[in-house]
Image (cartoon, coloured by chain):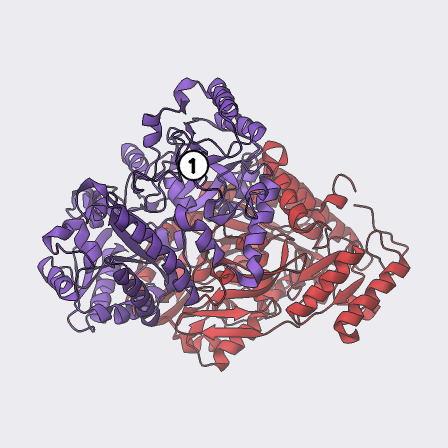
Chain colours: A purple, B red
């Protein structure tokens, strides 16, 4: 890709002149109405990567269009196809840590679906909802509550995100249906040529099983529309869990950094045998401490916090060197049995403690700890405090997120690699480990920096890029990549001369020959932009 | 497609001359060796649809090639691409009820992977195996046992099937990982042009999470290779479950045909709340009775067995009007709690009974009832007796298998539709209902007939085709279709002028421009064979 033209204040889509762009905006405006086409600097500011340094503009959009219906999306696609304007789609654009709402290609027009935000159906008997892509966790939660449904929604950490958007980016949620990201069922997709397709049983008109059976007759394309640029998802089924008799949020803390290994090995055993069936989150002292304190309380120097101070944080905040949030859901007798088993298993680790309290589902909104509400499906924004670590509202983070087998060996190997390289770069090692099933975990290293400190920001980007390559050498690949190193992360998936990339390109060219949908997303480029174009 | 040429004894691939075919066989032989290329009538007989009437030859192959390595598959693909020879791929070809090993296009060369049958890895710590496509349930079970692993394999009803083949055809298995057909993780696929691709984390050389994390970076193509003709799967990861403390096979019987409705509603509640977490099978009297008796014991007339006789079968075989096989797996305390809860819930249905006995995993091979071994992961062939219903070894069946929401309303609607039309055609209504998750069931109507009785066989095919259309009108679509009505079944998935079919064709043309891989599979035809070609 060409370098950003820093001289221009208003980026243009690649290959489009000022006049051509003005004419495209006129066409978008004619199709949607002026209030759904944003072009002012002030409007566009809201659609920047919120954590990018103010002086950088490589991922800046030229305009934002905000359709509110499938018809309007089709109209946008017609204009984009005719004029070769790249569209970068998001649900709510809260993909923070990976680029937020910003497009991979400078000058793209953002296709924001924030205002296509209806909850279309909630089915209590069969336990599912159908939502449009602008529906946030907050919105769906409120709709379930307003309908009086005794159903729980597996949510992400931050309630402002899009249910569809999080799903399409392989984002984690934490209740039982979060295991293997298993809660999506049935989609409607608008393809690049404007064709509206329904997946699974939805491909049959009037079929009753669209949102209850995950496949159809023939190949199942749903996961092809995740982490890709092959279509625009306009409806999606989401499974909801009936209220259990008891919800029991649990905590585990251990006091030595190397306890991470027996913690993971014990957890694998308890997840494999079904004792724990949800998605835990294991945080190290510095990451969990960042939710409840700021760095300057502990350490005012440059460079990573010393280990002795981390021990102090662990003790004073009472969070241990690793702290796991997790939960049980079910009949009280089963929960009691499992809690006793879990406690006995983990407390074989010297000094480890497991605790928690049972709660009726109705009482979850009143729980004090935000994590206990998150795991109980009650959305909030308190987990967002992490990014304030380096002081105030200007904190940012990028996520570096490799996947590894759920073993103590792999846990220590990933920790050592990440900690070592981050410390060498002068940054803290802030680890959020998400065992997404009984066999693997996603290790989200929150690379947190002060966005006003350009040197620190550059250092964070640079070390993360080195991490992508070093982790791959050791057999660990990213589950999701930041805009700035999507290509680099995809490069690591190079088996057989990049057979997978060639496959994704073949599909891309077949489905989107003009290359208008989110070029560059997860390293998938349309033909005209490949080969150094 | 053109009609079968009944005059020819040796079918040829479409558009290929006798000489061209002879030359292709020479080329296959040069690539694989003569012992891996079968052309004799005797050899080919084994690769017919075992349930097709002897006089029919519409789905007859011209030859069989049996490569045993990826290199040999690539060599076969080179020959097929150069000469335009269609290849119909199977693992073991036991897709009985849907066409067995036979190809959709008469004269296709069967690509049989029966001899590519190595168990490549069994990982006890992380609970998975990696297998080639010729590995049968029997083989993998034996390999696990031989290795002394305390791991259980979720298996299909008949042990001779291919683990990979069953997975690729969306086949059911019954243990907890059978829910939503969730046990597959990571694939190696040979594409039509010979490219070897690995999916998920396998796309990164040396990645450690290929068979423990279900996705990769970018779109996940695994389900695109199921029920399709887009590639040849050569390796697949399969999750294995650690031995539970207790296995408890369970039975439920009810005595009135309409009890099917409260049975399904109660089951949904117990599956939604996680009390039952596996894939039950609910059989009506006639189907379950066919495993343990033959029709002539009960009824010697033409036409369907009268209801009063079904009541007699229900009593004398002690199987009820509907009988559900299911099971619990887990800690004994949890199993005990769940059994009591399940028993109380179902026995609210008048006359319903639930019973079962706990068993250590080591003792499952000694269980007398084949279903209790199947649900415990010990493969056998006893369930195959069903097809002998009309007498002797010449019994056949075709499966008609719509999907419906797991509610009593939908259960009765599907039953009434199928029973009515089958009875009108003079056939028995033999129902196997498979709740594949907490929200939906697959209703396999086993349309069983005497393969020597051509009139009965024709009637079975004819009524099944009418059922495909009538079920679709009521909102129920097939999950899998027999060769003879794959096109008809796919036709029903017509939302937005067949948008899904057009999508599958776009992908087909991009991945397999010469159209050599399994043309017609699930209604997906390559370009040259579409539009009445």
Quadrant hosting residue A104: top left
Q: Residue furthest front?
A: A7
Q: Is residue B370 left or right of residue B392?
A: left
Q: Secondary structure at mark 1?
A: loop
Q: Is residue B314 above or below residue B135?
A: above
The residue that mark 1 highlights is: A5
Residue at 62% across, 52% down: B228
For the image, the number of numbered tags is: 1
Judge by depth and name the residue closer to the eye, A448 or B187: A448
Where does the image place residue B407, in percent across and percent down from the top left? 44, 44
Q: Is residue A396 above or below residue B17?
A: above
Where does the image place residue A502, in percent across and percent down from the top left? 58, 53
Judge by depth and name the residue closer to the eye, B122 or B336: B122
Please state, as top left, top right, bottom left or bottom right, where the N terminus of chain B lies in the image. top right
Q: Is residue A48 above or below residue B266?
A: above
Judge by depth and name the residue closer to the eye, A59 or A263: A59
Where does the image place residue B305, in percent across and percent down from the top left? 63, 52
Q: Is residue A308 above or below residue A210?
A: below
Q: Is residue A509 left or right of residue B278?
A: right
Quadrant hosting residue A35: top left
Q: Chain of mark 1?
A: A
Residue B108 visible, this orientation: no
Residue at 72% across, 61% down: B77
Where does the image place residue B156, in percent across and percent down from the top left? 54, 64
Residue at 59% across, 43% down: A527
Please state, as top left, top right, bottom left or bottom right, where the C terminus of chain B lies in the image. top right
Q: Residue furthest left?
A: A316
Q: Residues within 10 Å of mark 1 (few under 14, many from 20)?
A: few
Residue A300 visible, this orientation: yes
């Amino acid at each position: 890709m060409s370098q950003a033209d820093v001289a221009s204040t208003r980026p243009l889509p690649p290959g489009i002149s000022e006049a051509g762009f003005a004419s495209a905006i006129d066409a978008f405006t004619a199709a949607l109405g002026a209030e759904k086409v944003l072009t002012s600097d002030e409007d566009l500011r809201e659609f920047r990567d919120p954590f990018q340094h103010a002086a950088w503009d490589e991922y800046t959009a030229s305009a934002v269009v905000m359709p509110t219906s499938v018809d309007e999306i089709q109209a946008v696609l017609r204009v984009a196809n005719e004029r070769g304007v790249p569209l970068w789609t998001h649900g709510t654009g809260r993909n923070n840590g990976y680029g937020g709402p910003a497009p991979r290609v400078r000058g793209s027009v953002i296709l924001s679906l924030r205002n296509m935000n209806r909850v279309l159906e909630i089915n209590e008997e069969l336990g599912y909802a159908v939502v449009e892509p602008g529906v946030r966790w907050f919105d769906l939660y409120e709709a379930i509550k307003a309908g009086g449904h005794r159903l729980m929604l597996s949510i992400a950490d931050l309630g402002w995100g899009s249910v569809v958007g999080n799903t399409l980016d392989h984002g984690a949620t934490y209740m039982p249906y979060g295991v293997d990201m298993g809660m999506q069922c049935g989609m409607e997709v608008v393809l690049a040529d404007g064709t509206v397709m329904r997946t699974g049983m939805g491909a049959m008109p009037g079929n009753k099983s669209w949102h209850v059976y995950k496949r159809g007759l023939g190949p199942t394309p749903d996961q092809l529309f995740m982490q890709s640029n092959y279509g625009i998802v306009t409806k999606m089924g989401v499974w909801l869990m009936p209220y259990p008799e008891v919800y029991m949020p649990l905590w585990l803390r251990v006091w030595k950094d190397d306890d991470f290994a027996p913690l993971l090995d014990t957890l694998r055993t308890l997840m494999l045998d079904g004792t724990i069936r949800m998605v835990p989150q294991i945080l190290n002292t510095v990451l969990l401490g960042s939710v409840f304190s700021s760095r300057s309380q502990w350490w005012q120097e440059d460079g990573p916090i010393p280990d002795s101070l981390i021990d102090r944080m662990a003790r004073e905040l009472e969070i241990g060197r690793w702290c796991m949030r997790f939960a049980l859901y079910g009949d009280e007798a089963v929960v009691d049995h499992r809690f006793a088993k879990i406690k006995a298993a983990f407390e074989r680790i010297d000094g480890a403690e497991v605790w928690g309290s049972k709660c009726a589902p109705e009482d979850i909104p009143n729980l004090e700890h935000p994590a206990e509400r998150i795991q109980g499906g009650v959305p909030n924004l308190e987990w967002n405090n992490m990014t304030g670590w380096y002081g105030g509202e200007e904190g940012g983070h990028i996520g570096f997120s490799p996947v590894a087998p759920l073993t103590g060996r792999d846990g220590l190997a990933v920790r050592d690699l990440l900690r070592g390289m981050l410390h060498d770069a002068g940054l803290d090692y802030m680890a959020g480990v998400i065992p997404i099933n009984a066999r693997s975990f996603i290790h989200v290293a929150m690379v947190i920096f002060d966005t006003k400190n350009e040197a620190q920001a550059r250092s964070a980007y640079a070390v993360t890029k080195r991490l992508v390559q070093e982790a791959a050498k050791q057999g660990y690949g990213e589950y999701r990549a930041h805009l700035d190193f999507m290509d680099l992360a995809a490069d690591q998936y190079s088996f057989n001369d990049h057979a997978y990339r060639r496959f994704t390109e073949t599909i891309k060219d077949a489905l989107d020959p003009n290359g208008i949908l989110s070029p560059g997303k997860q390293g998938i480029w349309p033909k005209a932009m490949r080969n150094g174009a």
